[in-house]
Structures are given as C-alpha cells and as structure tokens.
Image: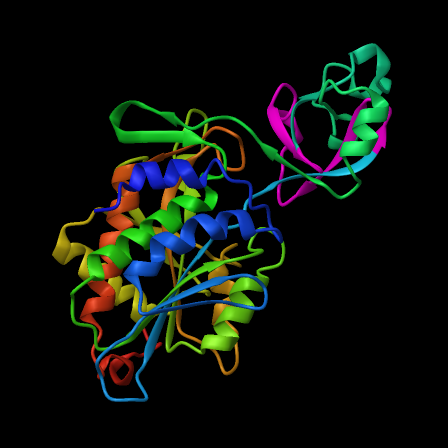
Amino acid sequence: MIDLQNFLKQMITAPGLSGHESAIRAIIEPVWQPLTDEMHVSRLGSLHGLRRGSAASPRPSLMIAAHMDAIGLMVKSINGEFLHITQVGGIDSRILPGQRVTVHGREDLPGVVVQPPDRQLPEKYADRPIPLEHLLVDTGRPARQLERLVRIGDLVSYAQSPLEMAGGAIAGHTLDNRVSVTALTHCLELLQNRPLAWDVWAVATTQEEETLGGALTSAFQLRPSLAIALDVTFAASPGSPSHKTYPLGKGITLGWGPNVHPGIYRAFEDLAKKLEIPYSMEVIPRHSGTDAFAMQVIAEGIPSFVIGIPLRYMHTPVEMVSMKDVTRAGRLLAEFAASLDTAFLDNLSWDE
C-alpha cells in the first residue's frame, strides 16, 4: 500500500511551478507506473496514465484530471544584493513578507521575502499591505555573486516544510492541487485487480494556475467520453462566509453549475449516498476555476464534472487539508470508474 501522507509530503517539497512541472512529474511518474498499463507525457508536459478496460473496442473512456502545477514567484530584476519578483499564478502579496523561499538559479539558493521599512515606501503604503512590486527577496549573497548565480526569469518557490497537524490534517504550501494528485493516486491503487469496462485515464495536468493549457491539450489528445476535474475548494476557517466554504475533514464537495453535467452529478450523488461518503453540493454558477472548464469545451463538448477537496488558507504557504477527505475523494472516484458500463452514455441525459 502506498503511504499517501508521505507521498503528499514528498510532492509538496518539490517546486513544479506552473509551466515548469518537470520536477513534480518526476515524483509522480514512478508511483503511477505500476498502477497503470501505459504512460506517456503530453507535448505540454502533462502526465497520462491509462488503465485499460475490458469492453469491446472502441471503448468509452473516463479522464480524471488533477493539476500538478503550483503557484509561486519569478525573478523580475536584480538590484544589487536583492531580487525583485513577480507572481506565477494567483499570489496575495499580504502573506509574503517574512516567508522562506528557494531561488532556483544556477543553483538553489535559500532566501527570504522582505519589505522595506514604511519610511522608505511611498506614503500611500504606510501601515498598509505592500504590493508585490515593492517586495524583495534577500539571499544574503553579495551583489556580484548574486548576479552570477541568478538570472531574470528564474523561479522562486516556497520553502516551508510540511506540518502534520492534529486530527489527521496536514499543512504546507502547494497542497493546491497536489492533494488531488494524491487522491487520484489512491483511486488508481483501489482500482488494481478490479475489472473495468471503460478505459480510465489518470492525468496530472500542467499550467492550470495560468492557462488551463494542460487540460485543454490532454482532453483534445485523449478525447474522453467523460471528464472529471479533481481540485480543491474553500474550507471553513475563522471569518470565512459559511455559504461559500465547506467543513474541513467532514466530506468532499460535488460541483453543480454550468461546467457540470447534471446526469453525472446525479450519478455521483447516488453513489456517495450508497457508499455513505459525506458530501456537500458546491454551487458553482460561473467558470469553475478548474480544469473542468477546459475539458468541457473540447471538440464537440465533453460531459464534465467537478469534485472538490476542502482546503483552508488557499494560495498561502500554510494551506491545510484533512487526509480523510483526500481518501474519500479517491474512493468515490474508484467506485465510479468501476461502476461504469457500456450503457452509461446511452442513459446520460442533460435534462434535470
């Protein structure tokens, strides 16, 4: 059995920023290799793992996508002993000052994000959060050495170590969305030695945080009959609105909105009730902000669905998730994949 928590901790110590995912793919690939019948990498760097079904060819196929890229920073300019930075993906500059980072230059350099004293900033920023353009990374290196080791465009990733919390929770950076890669890995493990009618594609997508490019291109290449985006959603925390968040450790979410096929929702809801897996309906009235938006509109359209794993403090270096919800998502996906028969598509209706 795979130690899912240790696998997750290993993944969230790797950078793999959006558009630069080779480091994280190198961790996932050997774990998926024995769980799949075939593997390959797309032209945009997404990892495709296939479990072959047994139905007559041409078989229908299910694509389950979990993006493996992460948010982070990039060197924008070098000013003496300091680095000016810009963002890769959605970064809230309020949480950056004082954070430990790694600058991925010609060698990895430890650094810290710092802000100048108030009196050295424009008056309008006094006693207010400092915009990213005024923050700096200090590696402690002298200017001449820094210029030799770091280039404009080098990546900067969070460097905090993961923390095991009480109650089976884990905290750290990059849990969005490597918890979903963990859940998908659990799904593949549960499907071992189980008969499948459909082909099942496990896909660790690239560039979700910036372009959705991995999901767009993988869905176009694989042309699945159904597509599921597995991602994180907002968990309840102090001060968070209760109608927009979901309890941590008390179940997953099933998406409901224009990126979700109603027939697939009904199938997942019925299955979750049967398996006694706790869930909440997550109303997503617009763009889901997930790979489902990309996969749904490929070719003539792919019936799609969104599963969410509640996550606290999203897009910070101290994201928090419950491992119970991770395994729940993996189990529900495995049972859904195993339940698919050749008549499923014939009975799938958009009508509610």
> Is 18 positioned to the left or the right of 77 in the image?
left
Residue in the foreground of this view, choosing between 12 and 228: 12
Residue in the foreground of this view, choosing between 352 and 230: 230
Count of picture labels: 0
Which residue appears at 48% of the width and 35% of the height?
13
Q: Quadrant of the C terminus?
A: bottom left
Q: Estimate the x, y position of residue 167 in percent, counting from the top left.
A: 25, 26
147 is higher (above) or lower (below) than 88: above
Which residue appears at 35% of the width and 52% of the height?
31
- Toward which corner of the image does residue 2 lie, by quadrant? top left
Q: Estimate the x, y position of residue 204 in percent, counting from the top left.
A: 45, 58
- Pick out the residue farthest to the bottom: 57
Is residue 89 located in the magenta-colored stretch of the structure? yes
Residue in the foreground of this view, choosing between 21 and 251: 21
> Is 188 positioned to the left or the right of 103 in the image?
left
Inspect this view and state whether residue 245 appears: no
2 is higher (above) or lower (below) than 37: above
Q: Name the image colouring.
A: rainbow
Q: Estimate the x, y position of residue 232 in percent, counting from the top left.
A: 42, 46
Q: Estimate the x, y position of residue 7 in percent, counting from the top left.
A: 35, 41
Q: Which residues are magenta?
A: 78-107
Inspect this view and state whether residue 326 appears: yes
Which residue appears at 24% of the width and 55% of the height?
189
Is residue 292 located in the magenta-colored stretch of the structure? no
